[in-house]
């Protein structure tokens, strides 16, 4: 690391220590609660997809799901001469629990890159943004591909972070199996789209998924979207139509809406969603819970490897708020 870079890096670590009330950031520390909340907000805002779903801070490691954005109807009538009026929980049709597990977001930045950044006035911001954006992408990848939580994960065997935590699609398979399609004809192991297939086109599949699997309460929800894998619709249907944002907002256009609708629903594509999959749900039905005051951090200057290392962890859980508002189709094969 160059001497001028060292001065900037030392200022960065001193600022980090002051914000968190610790004298030495090379020793593991709890991130100060207000800084923790600001960091979570930055992670969410760094991704247009994460900005559309729920990211909740929860006090307990384990408890009942929050369920704030997907409502069930509460209107009713009661003959009070015969019985008392009954209240209804508007936050969901089912009561399920979540459990936040530790996820490590450990990154490093080589001296060479820091030296290259030293000439820019936003040196500290560049370090922060790199770490924040990496955590955002990791969360999206886990959400779509996580199937288990191993004591020690293995990126070589699970490059899509399948063994870091249990994501939304795996929650569908385990908790909502009745609303998951994996094949058209029994034993075929696939859903064929085409003239001689299980469905003539993707529109027919989406109509069927809504009619058969989405609860009537949610079938007319205008927030329903069809989340598509990249093999299902040609790229020509997915021009980026997101509004332009100032560079300072750092909003990543990682959710793209198609010009083509599927089964009268907006078709969207998001990073790391399985290429042959299709999910029907409001984006507001997907949540990430993170446990308050569990973010730990250590920043190490590792001279032997010519890099700085950021060790960071937080307890989190991936939740589908209302199972009745979601359906999933996998193993889709679009014919010629």
Image: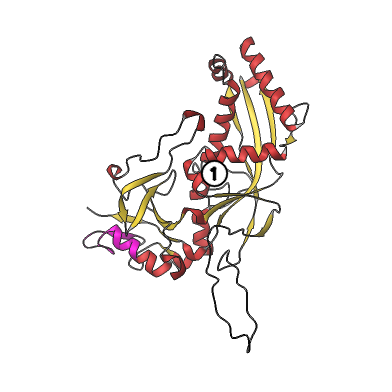
Residue at 68%, 26% in the rendered image: 300
Would you identify the image quadrant in which residue 220 lies?
bottom left
- From the top left corner, tell me how far across and down residue 43 is, in percent: 56, 39
Residue at 40%, 55% in the rendered image: 225
Residue at 71%, 40% in the rendered image: 33
Residue situated in front as seen by the camera: 95 or 159: 95
Magenta segment range? Answer: 190-207
Q: Is residue 1 above or below residue 297?
A: above
Residue 26 shows in this picture: no
Residue holding disc 1: 139
| Quadrant (top left/top right/bottom left/bottom right) for the N terminus | top right
- From the top left corner, tell me how far across and down residue 177 is, in percent: 48, 65
Q: Is residue 110 left or right of residue 275?
A: right
Q: Is residue 280 left or right of residue 54?
A: left
Q: Is residue 223 above or below residue 213?
A: above
Residue situated in front as seen by the camera: 77 or 216: 77
Would you identify the image quadrant in which residue 98 lies?
bottom right
Figure disc tally: 1
- From the top left corner, tell me how far across and down residue 156 is, in percent: 51, 39
Would you identify the image quadrant in which residue 330 lies?
bottom left
Q: Is residue 197 magenta?
A: yes
């Amino acid at each position: 690391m160059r001497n001028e870079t060292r001065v900037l890096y030392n200022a960065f670590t001193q600022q980090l220590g002051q914000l968190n009330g610790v004298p030495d950031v090379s020793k593991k520390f709890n991130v100060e609660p207000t800084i923790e909340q600001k960091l979570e907000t930055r992670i969410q805002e760094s991704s247009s997809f994460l900005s559309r779903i729920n990211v909740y801070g929860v006090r307990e490691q384990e408890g009942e799901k929050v369920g704030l954005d997907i409502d069930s109807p509460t209107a009713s009538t009661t003959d009070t001469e015969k019985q008392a009026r009954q209240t209804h929980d508007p936050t969901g049709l089912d009561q399920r629990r979540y459990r936040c597990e530790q996820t490590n977001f450990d990154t490093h930045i080589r001296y060479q890159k820091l030296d290259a950044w030293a000439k820019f006035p936003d040196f500290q911001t560049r370090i922060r943004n790199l770490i924040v954006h990496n955590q955002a992408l990791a969360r999206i990848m886990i959400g779509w591909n996580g199937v288990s939580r191993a004591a020690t994960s293995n990126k070589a065997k699970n490059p899509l972070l399948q063994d870091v935590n249990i994501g939304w699609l795996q929650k569908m398979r385990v908790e909502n199996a009745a609303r998951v399609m994996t094949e058209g004809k029994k034993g075929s192991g696939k859903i064929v789209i085409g003239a001689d297939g299980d469905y003539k086109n993707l529109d027919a599949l989406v109509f069927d998924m809504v009619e058969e699997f989405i609860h009537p309460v949610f079938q007319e929800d205008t927030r329903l979207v069809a989340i598509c894998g990249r093999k299902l619709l040609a790229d020509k249907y997915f021009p980026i139509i997101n509004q332009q944002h100032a560079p300072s907002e750092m909003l990543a256009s990682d959710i793209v809406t198609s010009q083509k609708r599927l089964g009268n629903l907006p078709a969207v594509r998001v990073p790391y969603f399985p290429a042959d999959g299709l999910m029907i749900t409001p984006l507001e039905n997907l949540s990430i819970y993170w446990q308050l005051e569990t973010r730990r951090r250590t920043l190490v200057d590792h001279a032997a490897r010519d890099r700085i290392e950021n060790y960071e962890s937080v307890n989190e859980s991936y939740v589908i708020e209302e199972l009745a508002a979601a359906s999933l189709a996998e193993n889709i094969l679009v014919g010629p």
